Each structure stands twice: as structure tokens, then as C-alpha cells.
Amino acid sequence: MATEIVSSSSSGHGEKVPVSSIAYALDEKRRAALSEVDNAKFGWFHVKVSLVAGVGFFTDAYDIFAINIAATMLGYVYGRTASGFALSSNESLGVKVATPIGNIFGQFFFGWMADVVGRKRMYGIELMIIIVATFGQAVAGQARAVNVLGVIIAWRVLMGIGIGGDYPLSAVISSEFASTRSRGRLMTAVFANQGWGQLAGAIVAYVVVAAYKDDLLSETTDNLRSIDFMWRILIGLGCVPGAIALYFRLTIPETPRFTMDVERNVKQAAQDVENFLTTGSYYVDPDAVVQRVQAPKATRRDFFAYYSKWENARQLIGCAYSWFALDIAFYGLGLNSAIILEAIGFGSPSSDLKGTLKIYTNLKNICVGNIILTVAGLIPGYWASFLVIDSWGRKPIQLMGFIMLTILFIIMGFGYDALTATSAGKKAFVFLYCLANFFENFGPNTTTFIVPGEAFPTRYRSTSHGIAAASGKLGAVISQVGFAQMANIGGTNKFVKHIIEILAFFMLTGVFSTLLIKETKQQSLEDISNERQDGFIEGVAPLGEPV
């Protein structure tokens, strides 16, 4: 005989209802709400999610990659090496690697907390950290007991924690609100703001350099003081987009999947779905009776039970290692593009130039070079992925990207001397470099962000994305340290060709890790999670049971 509970009827009399019937009804209600989300037409609410999440990635990329240009400016002001005014290899490494180190902690912590307390409660906190840390860098000072580079590095670690938190939060929020047929494009549109952020950083740097040209070339002004202003303006402007987006992040609704599957409040989730799909807004009644259900709950034992199954573990391993391999190349080259341009002599000032004219020309050429690299390769790659991500699928794009990157880095590395020996060869090298940037984004840089945001159960989705993203930033740290320590073996930038050859090896390993990943296109998040959905809700939770 089925277990029964007493339920109040409209007549006020108690009525016994089988628990199995209630569980079935709630299970059907959950599936109906999820179906509404999965089959919803693309509307204003999806645009809002894309913009709110995307501005964060715009800010992230601006703040991360602006240091590529700012490091050269810092070298002129604070660097003193045997070869002139430049940061030492360790100083340059410190300001560049600080953010990826912070990323690792932020991705782990925010990824985990978003699964514990909710996406909404954590969303915006990471942006506050980014804003404060960015402003702190811009006003960093120096004293007898405090080195300005040390202060900048400390602020960049903190900023990196905030940026790291943005990865799992933005990925999971955009995936859990998206419809099945357009989820890949929505997530790609969010992530593509990384390219616009890099471009904005290069353009702002060029404008700042141009604005200070007269002061920089003047014989009556303090030229180093002008450069000190330049890097502070470049870094400090990274606060602006974050400050604009903060209000919208703090007011975005909780995802219905978290409300249903983690808070286990099916009624509220169904109401939220109805509201944001029809009006673009949501409302939570503080006096509403909360009816929690019995469903799989996040615990340490449950976590290990889920990932003890090879089909689940291999997805996480494949996502994590693919991101690790990709970021070795993406950040190794992205944060050192000025060194690459200098190594091949592209855009370097003429040796006939002297003094501040040479400094101005060098800074201008670095800015122009970064603009060219971004426009010619990075941005088109994101949008090529956008066009086909939901038709080709994630796995074919990632596989193609790693294969093409392997080939390109082999050509660039083993043909380095021949390519850089002539003017035509240098132009060919820059073309290949832009092509590599293109296939990073029309390939694993985009897909390694998307797949971990789709492939796991709601109760572990953010944590798993954080693990994969942190693996990527570990690769970025290793790449930065390796680049700094090896680039000048045998002479200035003499080892760069061998570094590119090493990158080719890691791209090849990415091909094999991609084979571990299963395709996620045109499937609901629940189907991808590899968990039985029929009977997911087993009943009503006892009153007073903690969430």
C-alpha cells in the first residue's frame, strides 16, 4: 500500500494523497518547466543575459591583456636593466602571471560557492572585486619600503580572483537560461566579448600614446612622468565597463535549474520560468510557502559517486586537460605578443631613432601590432564559432582547432629562422600567427568554455566548470613561467622558436583529450548530465529539512 500524507483541500477538510502521486506530479511540473526553458524562442531576456554576462568578459579580457602593453610602459618608468629601460624577466613575469594565479583560486572558490549558495548570490561579487582591484592598480604608489611593482602584482592577484569567478558564473548562468537550439550561440556571444575587450585595450593604449605624444617628445617636460600617466589611464579605464554592468548583475534572477535542483523548490522555479519568459522579469514572494522536494542532493559522497563513473569522469578530464593545453598557447602568446613582434622585428622602431622618439615609436608600434593581431585573427575566430557552434557541434570544432594549431605551430616553430630571415618571410610569419589566433577561437578557446558549462548536473555544474577553468589557468601560469625563463636562452628571444615547437606538442595532446569529450549540441542540459530524469523527484522533503 502506498504511503499517504494529509493534504488540505479547498473545503478545509483533510484529504489523504499518496506520496507517489505527489512525487509524480512534481516531477512532471519540473520537466514541464525545463521544457519551457529549453524550447523558448530567443527573446529580450536572452539578450539581457548575453549583455550582462558579456560585459564581464569584455572587462576580464581588457584587464588581463592590457598588461601586455602596460608592461612595456612600466619598464620605461620603473625598469632598470643592463639593456636599458625595461622590466627584468622576473618583473615582467610577476605582473603578467599574477592574474592567472588569482584566476585559479577564483575559479575554484566561486565555482564551488555558486553551487552551494546560488548563482545569483555570487554574481556581481566577482565584479566588485575586479573594479576595486583595477582601481587599486591605477593608483599604486611607491615608497622606501614598498615597491610599486609589488603593489601592482598584489592587486592583480586580487583582480584575478574576481576574473576567475566570472568564468563559471557567466558560463553556467548563460547555459541554464538558454534554449537548447541556441545555447551554443548564446554562450559563444558571451565569450566573444573577450575579443572585443582585447581590441579595446589595444585601441585605448594607442589613443593614450597618441594623446601624450607631445609631452613624450618634449624636451622641457618629464617624459617618464608622462609614461607613468599613460599606463595608469590604460589600466584604470578597465573599471568603467564593470561599473556599468554591476547593477544588472546584482538584479539578474536565479536560474530556474538551481532553484529546482539545488534549492529543490519546484513551485518557485516554475513561477520564475513563467515570469521571465513572458515579461523578462521575476518576482519572489517572501511569504510564499516553500515546498521542497526529495531529489539528488550535493554531498561529498554523491560527488564522488557521480565522478566514479568513467563516462562522467572522462568528460571532466577531457574538459580540464583540453583547457590546460589550450591556455598554454593562448596565454603564452597572448600575453607576450609584444615580445613575438619584437623578436621577428615587425614594427620595431628604426635603430636610427634615439631618445624619446624611439620610446614613442616603440609604444605606438606595439599598440598597432596588437590591434592588427586582434582584428585579423582573434575576433573573426569567435564569430566563426558563433555561426556553426549549434550545427557542427562543439567536439568537431575543438578537434579541428587543435589539429590546425598543431600544424601552424610546427610550421612557425621549425620554419622560424627561414621565415624571419627576410621581409616577406616576416609578413608570412605574422599571417601564420594571425591564423593561429583565428583557430584558437574558431576552436578550443571557445569550446573549452562552453562544454563544461553544459556537461554536468546542475548541483555540480559550476564547480566542474571551475575545475576545468582552473586547469586552464594552471596552463597559463606554466606557460608564462616557461616563456619568461626560456625565451632568452642563447640570447635575447633566441629560444622563441623552440617555445613555439613546444606549443605544437601541447596542441597535439589536445587532439587526444578532445576525444574524451562527448558532444553536447542540441541536447537538454539534463540529458547531457548522464542522469536518469524520469523519477528525478522522489517525493516531498520533510518539513524543516535543510536545503
Image (spheres, grey):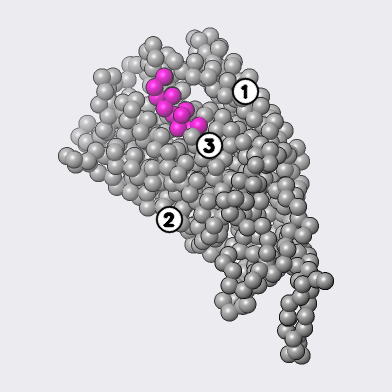
Residue drawn at (59%, 69%) of the image = 545
Element at label 2: helix
Residue 541 in picture, x, y percent from top left? 66, 69
Q: Which residue is mark 2?
A: 128
The alpha-carbon separation of the residues under discs 3 and 1 comes to: 17 Å
Residue 264 in picture, x, y percent from top left? 64, 64
- Outermost residue, front side: 1
Q: Of the residues tagged 1 and 2, which is closer to the observer?
A: 1
Q: Which disc is residue 471 wearing? A: 3
Q: How many marks?
A: 3
Q: Is residue 4 above or below residue 431?
A: below
315 within the magenta span:
no
Principal secondary structure, stretch drawn in magenta: helix
Horizontal side, residue 8 vs residue 464: left or right: right
Between 84 and 265, the one lying in front of the other is: 265
Tell me which label, 3 or 1, sits earlier in the chain: 3
Q: Is residue 324 above or below residue 269?
A: above
The alpha-carbon separation of the residues under discs 1 and 2 comes to: 39 Å
Q: Which residue is mark 1?
A: 508
Residue 445 appears in the figure: no
Between 450 and 348, the one lying in front of the other is: 450
477 within the magenta span:
yes
- Amino acid on which the number 2 mark rests in the picture: Met
